[in-house]
Image (spheres, helix red, strand yellow):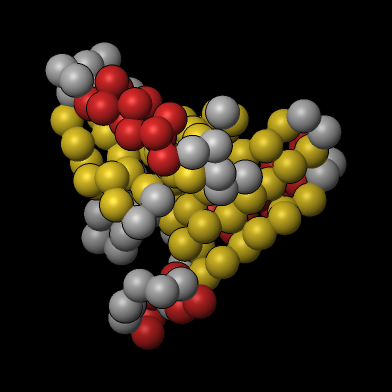
């Protein structure tokens, strides 16, 4: 199992990762726009970041831009991204974190998201390092 912070920005993801690159060195390993993603989107939102990965040494951060009109607010702009090695482990982690919390995205297609009983957000994926 691997856990990484997942940062959500209000349309400034690309700018922030460039800044972190200056601060920490390292590279942006992945930068997928909304227009390149499998999700339907409005043309004016196509350049927003759907999914990005930044790494520098042992530091690895995942990031995205929030949905237009639903930009993340402080306190709701960080989640933990958990990569599980198998479906059984993924289901166990998802179910345990959801107990006493709330399911934000049901576990389907290898991904799910919950808010745990302490109000922290968790993204649970199958081996998506």
Residue at 28% across, 45% down? 107
Name the foreground residue: 68 vs 107: 107
Coordinates of residue 66 in the picture (x, y in percent): 37, 54
Name the foreground residue: 17 vs 113: 113
Coordinates of residue 129 in the picture (x, y in percent): 62, 45
Coordinates of residue 84 in the picture (x, y in percent): 50, 35
- In the rendered image, the quadrant that contains the N terminus is top right
Coordinates of residue 120 in the picture (x, y in percent): 33, 23
Image check: 113 left or right of 128?
left
Residue at 50% across, 63% down? 49
Q: Is residue 62 above or below residue 101?
A: below
Image check: 103 left or right of 30?
left
Image check: 46 left or right of 2?
left
**Quadrant of res 73:** top left
How many numbered discs? Answer: 0
Work out whether residue 12 can be spotted: no
Residue at 27% across, 34% down? 114
Work out whether residue 42 can be spotted: yes
Residue at 79% across, 51% down? 27
Q: Is residue 2 above or below residue 45?
A: above
Q: Is residue 39 above or below residue 95?
A: below
């Amino acid at each position: 199992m691997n856990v990484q912070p997942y940062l959500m920005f209000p349309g400034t993801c690309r700018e922030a990762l460039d800044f972190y690159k200056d601060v920490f060195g390292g590279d942006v390993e992945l930068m997928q726009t909304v227009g390149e993603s499998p999700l339907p989107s409005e043309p004016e939102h196509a350049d927003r970041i759907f999914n990005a990965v930044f790494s520098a040494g042992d530091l690895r951060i995942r990031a995205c831009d929030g949905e237009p009109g639903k930009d993340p607010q402080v306190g709701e702009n960080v989640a933990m991204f958990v990569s599980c090695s198998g479906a059984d482990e993924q289901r166990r982690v998802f179910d345990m974190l959801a107990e006493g919390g709330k399911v934000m995205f049901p576990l389907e297609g290898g991904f799910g998201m919950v808010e745990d009983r302490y109000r922290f957000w968790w993204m649970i994926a199958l081996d998506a390092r």
